[in-house]
Amino acid sequence: MAQLYDLNPYLQTFEAEVVALEGQKIALSQTLFYPEGGGQNSDTGLLEWGDVKAQVVGLEKRDGAVWHTLEGIVPQVGTVLEGRMDWNRRYRHMQRHTAEHLLAQAFLRVSSDFRVQAVSMRSPECTLDFGGHPDESDALEATKVWMEAVYRNLPVRAFEVLDSDLERYPLRRAPKVSGLVRLVVVEDPSDSSGFWEVSACGGTHLARTGEAGPLLIHRLERVKSGLTRVVFSAGWEAFEQLSQTYLDARGLAQGFSSGLPQLVSRVESLREEHAGLKTLLEDSRLEVARHRVEAAPSHDWNGGVLKVLELENLELMSAVIKTLGALERTLGIVYGEGKVAVTSTMDSRAGDVLRELLERSGGKGGGRPELAQGSADPAKLKEAIERWVRSSAQVPEVRS
Ligand SMILES: [Zn+2]
């Protein structure tokens, strides 16, 4: 049975009678609420009777009826009620869906190899999966074909035909149903067939192509089975993303004291500057680390040298670790802010020393024989290290 959303997808309110009831689910004599299908999301909205307003939270098509799942109070069979669609949501679905038909046809017009294998319109970023490996330049061509169809503001119609009459229509792909087939056509009076696009579809669509714009192709992705996924937005959703992206880019340009056309080169030169500064900073850290390690007292330890450094912050940690790790026959301990690293260029394993320190301070960590790292409560860690140095190293022989 054709439903109201099939007959007039632009209606926003309707009256109906409750004809069946199953728990929180009701079926109506007619409905505007589109149940999920063909890659299109279901509608949401309100049903009202008397003083009661109930939110429609789910929809399913079963046994030729659309079942509405309600939140809260459910009306009895025979109740006459009014339905009110969430029109903002529905119109966006209609824009996505009509744009999808147009884009599938536009790619096909660029190359007969570009045939749609899968569709999704679940989010503002819709997808079409194509065979035939379209690339960026094909996408640009298809966008131009799409825009032309939109600027021409061609009429879009939906109607049912018997499958035996289908040969009269230039269908883009074979229908999945038989018997009565619902066609969605974009008319083109300048084409000998009378059509710009024909496909079998049960969804809701715009009345004219001009309502589908603008179009934004986000990206092309390679997906499984050798298909190419075209990610796109259309209508209000494309407009919102395009204008937000423009505002973001303009704000970014202003922040860099550059004009929008110069933004790319400005970012490019900042990136180069950043890479240069990063190298300079790394070299400076190593230089400072070398001085700190040289200035730290040295203790004789197991035929080598023990160096212990406390850092006020962790910025120099990795540079100090690197410097200590380059010294011959040295056991290094560097710590600060509750972090500790042990380096070893001796037979003793860094992990063994770290374990002793962590056992005394209740921390955790691990690592390799030449480098082990851990963390513990800062005060306990400091005390544990000082105690370990006093008991293990030949203190107070300081050679600095
Ligand atoms: Zn459709």
Image (cartoon, helix red, strand yellow):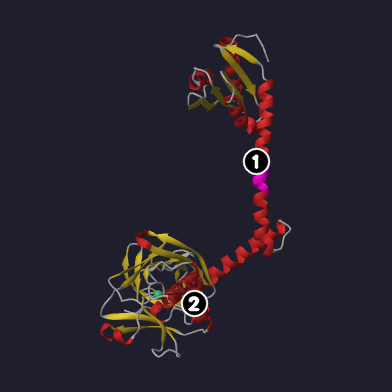
Q: Residues within 10 Å of mark 2 (few under 14, many from 20)?
A: many
| 1 or 2: mark nearer the eye | 1
Q: Where is residue 26 in the image (x, y as percent from the top left)?
A: 35, 68
Q: Residue 146 carries which label?
A: 2
Q: What stretch is highlighted in magenta?
A: 273-279
Image height of 191 relative to 25, above or below: below
Looking at this view, is 275 or 55 the one in front? 275
Which quarter holds ligand 1? bottom left
Q: Residue at x 49, y 22 (%)?
A: 351
Q: Residue 347 carries which label?
A: none
Q: Where is residue 353 in the image (x, y as percent from the top left)?
A: 51, 18
Label located before the other in sequence (1 or 2): 2
> Label 1 belongs to which residue?
279
Q: Which residue is drawn at 40% across and 60% down?
A: 223
Q: Where is residue 378 in the image (x, y as percent from the top left)?
A: 60, 25
Provide the major secondary structure of the magenta segment: helix
* Residue type for callout 1: Thr
Q: In this view, does 71 lie to the left or right of 381?
A: left
